[in-house]
Amino acid sequence: MTSSAVDNLSRLGITLPDAPAPAANYVPYVTVGNMVFVSGQLPLVEGKLSVTGHVGNDVTTEQAAKQARQCAINLLAQLNSACGGDLGRVKQVVKLGGFVACADSFTDQPEVINGASDLMVEVFGDAGRHARFAVGSNNLPRGTCVEVEGTFLID
């Protein structure tokens, strides 16, 4: 990893976990040319979800934003693997896609996915600024309240 990304992760108190294994018949990331497409990541910690449910019902926006941040940590673990352990190869976080399991009346999906977006900027600086979508869903895999995918430009 680049020293600035390593320094930033260290300053934030983040140690990247081993890249989570896929839960079904897909690969965790695909590299095409200089682009890395990372599959949607759940907020797993040591293989477990700490929060399940629907935002706006049994999960607060703040709890869900923390879960989105954990999704971003898992995205970075996959990206680190795709880069052969060298996040210094990352030139740009291109796009994040965020899914929020939420109550029908909940409309603060962007605030939830900010948990992931903020981490990308904290780790990569201006190269962490990205395009994004944040949408609501009636349910997500394993009962999680959030899932985040990412696209990255590397050298």
Image: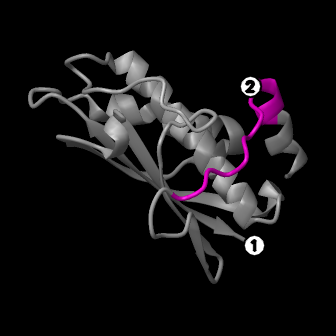
The residue pinned by badge 1 equals 155
Label 2 SS: loop
- What range of the chain is rendered magenta? 8-22
Is 60 contained in the magenta span? no
Q: Give the number of the disc on residue 67.
A: none
Q: Residue furthest left?
A: 105
Distance between the Cα atoms at labels 2 and 1? 25 Å
Is 9 contained in the magenta span? yes
In the picture shown, does residue 22 fall above or below 147? Answer: below
Contact (Cβ within 8 Å) of mark 2 with mark 1: no
Q: Nearer the viewer, residue 34 or 131?
A: 34
Residue 112 falls left or right of residue 94:
left
Give the residue at x 52% y 40%: 71
Residue 2: x and y in percent read 86, 51
Residue 64: x and y in percent read 39, 25
The residue pinned by badge 2 equals 12
Q: Main secondary structure of the magenta part?
A: loop
Give the residue at x 17% y 40%: 138
Residue 39: x and y in percent read 49, 60
Label 1 SS: loop
Residue type (three-letter) at the residue carrying disc 2: Leu
Give the residue at x 25% y 27%: 54
Say which label, 2 or 1, has the lower sequence index.
2
Residue type (three-letter) at the residue carrying disc 1: Asp
Please tell me in which quadrant of the rendered image residue 103 appears.
top left
Please tell me in which quadrant of the rendered image residue 120 appears.
top right
Residue 144 falls left or right of residue 96:
left
